[in-house]
Image (cartoon, rainbow, N blue to C red):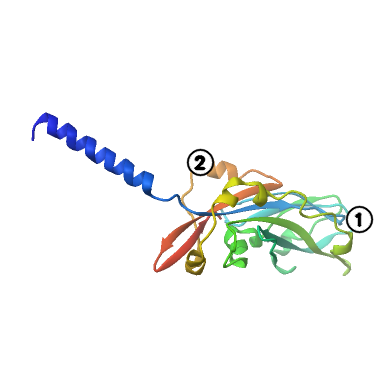
Amino acid sequence: MSTFHRYAYSAFIVTLVASLSAAAPPEKKLKMWLKISNQDAPLQMLGMKRELEPSYEPAVHYRNTSSKETVGMLISVLIRDLDGKVGSTQSNADGEYPTERKIAPGDDIWAREPALESTSLWILLKNPHTPCADARVVLERVTFADGTTWQRDRNKETDLWPDLHATSDPECKSTDLTDEERSELTSMTYDRTWSKEIEEEYAKETNEYLFVCGIRPLGRGLAAVCPR
């Protein structure tokens, strides 16, 4: 093959690859914005973070603003999609991780909350009608060492949805799931490819964060590949 033909062939391959890449549709995604919503309660959530090692479980930073020691707390995560559909899931029973539930008056502590894992939240919306959702973390119940409890009072809550990312994000409006894709989206899994940047981001304490799950082929269907 002459030098001219080799260059021509190389140019053809580069053009073909570029054309195929341009023609390939972008990966569809599920996006969820998770945000703490503190109310008038004896515990306040100061922040949260997506833990890596050793437990690989998210955690919430609690402060006891009451005059009594706590021995348990229960949180709920309220999830609202673009259609206004709201679902909810709750954290562990009070008795799980007992040492992380005992908080003296004025003290603060980090407590693991597996209910905040991305796949746990999206499983709640197994067949999402829209690719985006907003979620609010609220305190549901507090149990004190003296046997008394505090319960969430929905009648006294401030507005939980004053600002919705899902309704303002351009991708949420332009990228929807087809009926076929919804029916094929049958499983969720974790993306276990970590980078230094991801680890640093996950280690930060924050009141709000976004996680993105890519929709990819898996077996005969589709899976949402989510961060932990």
Horizontal and vertical percent position of residue 164: 71, 50
- SS of the residue under disc 2: helix
Q: Is residue 48 above or below residue 152?
A: above
Horizontal and vertical percent position of residue 197: 53, 40
* Residue drawn at x 68%, y 60% as measured from the top left: 79
157 or 73: nearer the viewer: 157
123 or 24: nearer the viewer: 24
The answer to whether residue 153 is seen in the rendering is: no
Marks 2 and 1, how far apart in space? 41 Å
C-beta proximity under 8 Å, tags 2 and 1: no
Image position of 198 (left or right of 69): left
Label disc, if present, on residue 129 of the rendered structure: none
84 or 147: nearer the viewer: 84
* Residue drawn at x 73%, y 57% as measured from the top left: 137
Label disc, if present, on residue 67 of the rendered structure: 1
Neighbor class of circle 1 (other Cα within 10 Å; few <14, some 14-19, many 20+) is few
Neighbor class of circle 2 (other Cα within 10 Å; few <14, some 14-19, many 20+) is few
Q: Which residue is mark 2?
A: 196
Type of residue at label 1?
Answer: Ser
The answer to whether residue 40 is seen in the rendering is: yes
Type of residue at label 2?
Answer: Lys
Q: Quadrant of residue 84?
A: bottom right
Q: Is residue 51 above or below residue 77?
A: above
Residue that extends furthest to the top in the rendered view of this protein? 3
Horizontal and vertical percent position of residue 129: 59, 63
Residue that extends furthest to the left in the rendered view of this protein? 1
51 or 131: nearer the viewer: 131
* Residue drawn at x 47%, y 68% as measured from the top left: 184
Image position of 173 (left or right of 195): right
Chain-order first, disc 2 or disc 1:
1
- SS of the residue under disc 1: loop
Image position of 87 (left or right of 215): right
